[in-house]
Image: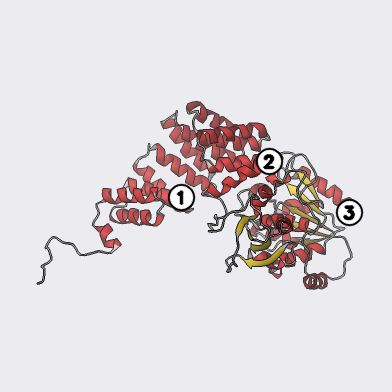
Amino acid sequence: MSTAESPSAVPPQPAAAQQATLTPPEAIVQAMAAYNSRDWAKAEQLCRSVLNADANIFSALNLLGAITAQTQRSKEAAELFGRAIALMPNNILVLNNLSGALKDLKRFEEAIVQIERAICIEPDHAQAYSNRGLALEELRQLPAALASYDRAIFINAAHAEAHFNRGNVLKALGQFDAAIANFDIAVSIRPDFAEAQWSRSLALLLVGDFSNGWASYEWRWKWDAFSSPKRNFSQPLWLGAEAIKGKTLLLHSEQGLGDTIQFCRYAKYAADLGANVVMEVPKPLVKLLQGLAGVAQFVETGGVLPAFDYHCPLLSLPLAFKTNLNTIPAPSPYLHSDGSKFDFWARKLGVRTKPRVGLVWSGGTPHKNDRNRSLALQSLLPYLPDTIEYISLQMEVRDADQPALQSSAIRHFGEALEDFADTAALCDLMDLVISVDTAVTHLAGSLGKRTWVLLPHLPDWRWLLDRADSPWYPSLKLYRQERIADWTGVLERVKADLTMLT
């Protein structure tokens, strides 16, 4: 006997049709729930369905702006927040959001204008002062940024982000103990504040407190914005506690190419414990690392991994081996250029009639500290004596540097440098390498090549403080900025030393 379908029953509908039946308030509620669960795609789809019906729904504009900001679409976020603030000019939340999007677009002065509007509306809004400090930092107005954070903390002493941001400014000003104290306050207020925990580790490592620094460095995996994704293997993480004799240990790269070059040295020490070491590395480094002591097998990142018992990210190895300033493994060299590559580049360079110096003046623009670590080629050229032959060790040259390069005598090979094996061979053919803080610095150091490193006033943690040498690379000499963003003193010292080279 058949059963008649109820006339009130509704047949199943596709997701788009279901959304079409929602009222705007219902869609916004669902979008907010999706946003809170980090389902950005669903939240965006719901917001756009609302705005397709009415382009002036404030809540949809603001939420969609937040979604696009979270997914690194800052230009669209700024436009959406701008439309939202046109509807509600005195909304503090949106003014803060708009300021953040403008800051991400590096439109710092405009960001400050929006934050000042928020402060005028609500003078005791701690978040606004903290956000203003961030924009002032980017403009290198550090004392003003510090004062802005101080005001935020005066208003709300439990504002963890303000303490964290204040710590970053103090670190930039060279007040490292005070910076660490501020990071400590931030994490005491919010113990799960992963970025503050990780920044604290960087400050500890910078001042040479490795015993505390390495442990805190593990917080990087809990920070959502960390540059490398966490690897969720079923096999356990090895941090030195378990015996690994007879076990297969997977060492895997993280962060930048320079990090892999610097910390691949630990493979030998794991092998010395009896482990069968497998190392997963990015494609540009596969040829370079062939023959690295201690590695039984290399796998290109993304390739099929063999069976293994334990794994460890490369930058967790100093923790596993309890590395301190006196026990940094610094074999020199621990990498070697390929003989056929060396011969190829020797022929390409031709007969040497002058000392040869390899140059690297800029790194990759995505690097968060690039504007501090890189310099314009035009700024470097006046400090290069013409009694030397200069070779560019960079594969890429920025558009802004092209005119200076073309008008100079620097030899540049660009895409002929297929990977780091080519760069290694070219480095080996130099009498000296001069580089800002990039992967080539680590490459030259790993090859044992005489290298001069040009460092910003606040260097990366691995270069430590107040020293001209590096315990990681015996062949390096460090030239440090004496003032923030001022390369003049560094370049004058380099020029004087180059004159001695000739």
The image quadrant of residue 134 is top right
At 78% from the left and 64% from the top, the residue drawn is 336
**Label 1 vs 2, first from the N-terminus:** 1
Judge left or right: residue 300 versus residue 411.
left
Secondary structure of the residue carrying numbered label 3: helix
- Residue 359 in the image, given as x and y percentages of width and height: 76, 57
Residue 69's label in the rendered image is: 1
Q: Is residue 89 left or right of residue 8?
A: right
Real-space Cα separation, disc 1 to disc 2, in angstroms: 37 Å
What residue did someone put label 3 on? 501
**Mark 2 or mark 3, which is nearer the start of the sequence?**
2
Q: Which quarter of the rendered picture does the N terminus lie within?
A: bottom left
Q: Position of residue 462 (x, y in %)?
A: 71, 47
Query: On residue 211, which mark appears?
Result: 2
In this image, 60 relative to 397: left or right?
A: left
Picture quarter with the C terminus: bottom right
